[in-house]
Structures are given as C-alpha cells and as structure tokens.
Amino acid sequence: MRQVHPEFAPRPGLSRGEMESLQADVAAAATFEDDFDFDPASVSLDSPAVDAPLVAGIDQAFLDDVAVSAVVVFRGGTVVERTAAVSPLDLPYVPGLLSFREGGPIIDALESLDSDPDLLVFDGSGRIHFRQAGLATHMGVVFDTPSIGVAKSLLCGTPKTDTDGRPEGWQTPIVANRSVDSVGDHEATSETVIGYAYQSRQYDSRPIVNPLYVSPGHRLSAETAVELIANLSGDYKLPEPTRQADAYADEAKASYRT
DNA sequence: GCGACAG
DNA sequence: ATCTTGTCGC
C-alpha cells in the first residue's frame, strides 16, 4: 500500500516539541467517526466470503537497534498475505512518542505490501493518547486508512467502571482525563469517550486476565472499533490479526539473527 | 513537587 | 519490548 499523507510521517531528528506538535496536527487531521465503505458485520474470522474486507494486523519484534515489523493480512479467517521488514531504530521508547520509534519501520513494512487493506489493527493505542494521536492514529492518517489501536495496558484516560475480573465480552468506556489534550475539533473532557476497555477472554483457571484497551485510530468511532475487535477475536486474548503478526515478527526475527 | 505512562 | 526453565493445569 502507499502513503496518502507522507507529510505526516514521523521524521527522525525532530525535537520533542516538534514531535508533539506533529502529533497535534495528526490528531486534528484524524476522524473519530465511522467513515469507511465496508460493513462492520462482514468483518469476521469465519466468513468464507471471498469479498470480505481485508484486515491487516501489524506488530514488531526488536533486536538491538533494529526493528522487525510484520504485517499479516486476513480476508475472513484466511491469511492472504504476510510481509516482514527489518529497519534501523533511531529513537528509544518514550511513553507518548511510540510512533516516532516504531512508525518508520511500520511504514517500511506496509509499503512492501501488495494488498491494500480496508482496516489496519495495531499493537498500541489510537485515540487513547495524550494528544489523541497514538500509533494507530498516526499510521491511519499517513495511509488514510481505517485503523484501530489495541493495547494491553492503559496509557491515559479513565475507565468509567472498575475493570477487575469481568466476564468475556464485557466492556466499559475509557473517558479522557487531565492528561489528554483537546486537539482541533476533538475536545477532551471527562465526557469524551476515547476508547473502551474490552474483556476479550476470561479463563476459568486463571484468577484474572486483564482487559484490552481498544481505541479508534482513524475513520472509526470508539464503538465501532470495539465491535470490530470483538469480531476479530478468537480463542486468545489478542485479536487474531495482531496475534499472528506478533508470531510472524518473532519468526522473522529468529531467521534474521542467524 | 506529585503523578506516571502504549511498546 | 527483551532476557529465560521449569512448571501448574486443562
């Protein structure tokens, strides 16, 4: 696939202030409402539909100063394409600036993809971010493609209800808190729903499984984002596209080491 | 100064 | 994220 807005792509060598300023521009350019042409209900893991939307899962593995970015593309429950790219890392991990560390490598991988996915699913946050421009939002805007962020822990915002020990399928809104800035048309008040905590799985044996934190990246509402992730969840905690991308990144990393 | 945070 | 053996349990 190709970048639609390369001017928003993370550039190495920016100061912290410039990175934060670019994130504000990205957030202002993002849409947190449904704006896509496929039917959310047609996104599933078992639909044999030959015309089901293409969903790409993206994840990375690391080795010293290089990132191995993997993309696994699904159509219904079938993998139709996989790619992996190895790229140098310029910056360390800094909470809030993840897209500047991982964005470049991810763009490399997505550009090497033959398919043109209808939906991108990232390992990290989307709108659940200090400037409402997490990794999923940043990448979604650069490729102008619907995107969702699925994080295993909460970066900011507050769950409307306590999330401990909830049953499978349970969900509660994540509203903005003081650490979330209003950006462009996207205000951030204690009423603003920036994502959802979603209990994708709960095993009888384990005492507790933490929920996933799902947030819209671009061209999606928070409600639709959770609905889609629910449709893409199988027997494991992580949605299948992300889980497979994670495994493929590890594979690619292992073969790269040798 | 306190809080405190994706991968 | 990454470094890692065994081990508990379905």
Image (cartoon, coloured by chain):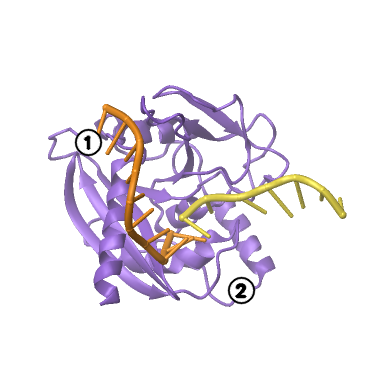
Chain colours: A purple, B yellow, C orange
Q: Is residue A50 left or right of residue A93?
A: left
Please tell me the numbered disc located at residue A18: none
Say the numbered circle drawn on residue A14: 2
The secondary structure type at the circle numbered 2 is loop
Label 2 and label 1: CA atoms lie apart by: 40 Å
Residue A164 quadrant: top right
Q: Quadrant of the C terminus of chain A?
A: bottom left
Q: Which residue sits at x=45%, y=76%? A: A65
Residue A1 seen by the camera:
no
Task: Give whichever of discs 2 and 1 has the lower sequence position.
Answer: 2
Q: Residue at x 48, y 26 (%)?
A: A171
- A92 with respect to A230 (left or right): right
Residue A97: give x, y in percent of width and height. 58, 61
A151 vs A10: above or below:
above
Left or right of residue C9, residue A165 in this image: right
Mark 1 surroundings: few (<14), some (14-19) or many (≥20) residues within 10 A: some
Label number found at residue A45 = 1
Q: Describe the element under mark 1 as helix, strand or loop.
A: loop
Residue at 27% in and 50% down: A244
Q: Chain of mark 1?
A: A
Q: Position of residue B6 (x, y in %)?
A: 52, 50
Look at label 2 and name its amino acid. Answer: Leu
Amino acid type of the residue tagged 1 in the rendering: Leu
Mark whose residue sits in front, 2 or 1: 1
Q: Chain of mark 2?
A: A
Q: Position of residue A129 (x, y in %)?
A: 59, 48
